[in-house]
Image: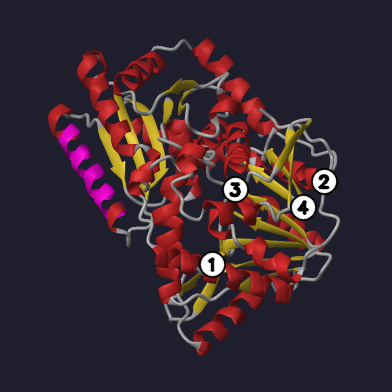
Amino acid sequence: MAEHKEHATEVAPRHRLVVVSNRLPVSIKKDEEGHLTAAPSSGGLVSALTPILSEHGGIWIGSTGHASNGEAHDAEVRKVLSSATRGALVRYLPVFLSGEEQTNFYEGFSNEILWPLFHDLQSRCNFAPRYWEFYKRVNQRFAAVTLKASQPNDMIWIQDYQLMDVARQIRLKRPEGVLAFFMHIPFPAPDIFEKLPWRRTILEGLLEHDLLGVQTPRDERNMVACIRTFLPGAEVERQHDYRIVTYRSRRSRIQAFPISIDFEQFAQGAASPEVGRRAFEIRRQLNGVRIAIGVDRLDYTKGIPERLRAFARLLRDYPATRGHVSLYQVVVPSRESIVGYRRLMHEIERLVAHINGEYSQPGWVPIHYVHRSLPRKELLALYRAASLALITPLKDGMNLVSKEFCAARTENDGVLILSEFAGAAPELHRGALLVNPYDELGIAETINRALAMEPTEQRRRMMRMRAWVRRHDILDWRDSFFAALDGEPVATPV
């Protein structure tokens, strides 16, 4: 039976909302006849903000993810986006980037500097000076589109690490505007952040916002510590569950708002008869072998090779598990134009082949490897068919897969093994089995413990996690953020 949650009060922004993100909430693709079409994107942010924009009016600004292909192409994109929102109060405005800008801003500064650095993997950074020049240029482009499309009393909500310099550009033209920011990835400690040559400019740009949201209390502490270390003139005071930073006469509120999922959507989808039948079919195909699942985007921060080696260690050190459990590892393609990601893909494929070659038996394969994006219903069926989820990122801002798995466990069974370095760990630690993703032996031992866990303990743990995710869903995250922007003392839900 589907669960229901009532949001007693929906908190909307007092002014029209303008969302600014690297990508628009639609994907632009060509159909079979070569015409451009717009398909809605999925994800928590889209689920949270689209209802507000649709009901109260607003604008979503972002790139299409593809390089501009001339004025005719750009005009067609605008026409497709206009058609996608016809009759609605929301508008989608594209920011067109050249191929050079896309390469240096997105693949370069965003994903060869900020992404590894903010995930504590500074050895993977390439601090090329040209990347910084393009980052500033593209952020200025986003700021220009935002200023042109918005009004002085609009609330502008900027999303994530790709756009940390947008507010600085907007403040030059609109010093009294309402600006907010949310960081979806982790924020590093000072000894990591100090590697960034442009650290001071980045921090000063962030402090142009009235409200700075981060994922966890640890990220909040790290951001405040960086401000104290690298901006000596900043004053920090603690109020309730947040900090107020005063710098150059501007006051910014910094607070943790752990992002979440649409719990009802996942729970109801998982409870559907169609998903239930598919989950039964998956279990039947594996002849009663228990399933451990891993679902990750292709990225070195997800700890996939480390997880595969830990699973191999399980089979080696606990031979009784052979033939009785299989890892179903889903890897969603991502950034495969970047050399490091292609190398990672090949490393994963080699490990899967090696482990399967060493341990396979007639009728049983240790690892089922899927390298593609799965439809929602297939993913929900996997969540339901599994006995446990193995979610072990080396570092993650949140990791919504862990919350999706809990929401999909409609029978309140199953075990969640979760990295202690995932942003979800402080919220789910009372039900999950936490592990160090670098600890191969520890993960193997924990998987063995999960396989032996009594149903009563599984149920107690899973009910606790599902209740938390249901109470602190994506709508609660959104409403808490807007309430904080209005100055209310909202508590951080951890």
Secondary structure predominantly adopted by residues drawn in magenta: helix
Visible residue check, residue 42: no
Task: Tell which circle, 2 or 1, labels the residue nearer the N-terminal end.
Answer: 2
Q: Mark 2 and mark 3: span between their CA atoms? A: 23 Å
- Marked residue nearer the N-terminal end (1 or 3): 1
User: Which amino acid, by three-letter code, is at mark 3?
Assistant: Met
Q: Residues within 10 Å of mark 2 (few under 14, many from 20)?
A: few
Badge 1 or badge 4: first in the primary sequence: 1
Left or right side of 461 for 375: left
What range of the chain is rendered magenta?
A: 341-355
Residue 92 x, y percent position in the rendering: 65, 70
Instruction: Give the Cα distance between marks 4 and 2.
Output: 29 Å
Q: Amino acid under label 2?
A: Glu
For marks 3 and 4, the one nearer the N-term is 3
**In the rendering, at what x and y percent does residue 292 appear?**
37, 29
Residue that mark 1 sits on:
136
Classify 97 as above or below 222. Answer: below
- The secondary structure type at the circle numbered 1 is helix
Q: Nearer the viewer, mark 1 or mark 4?
A: 4
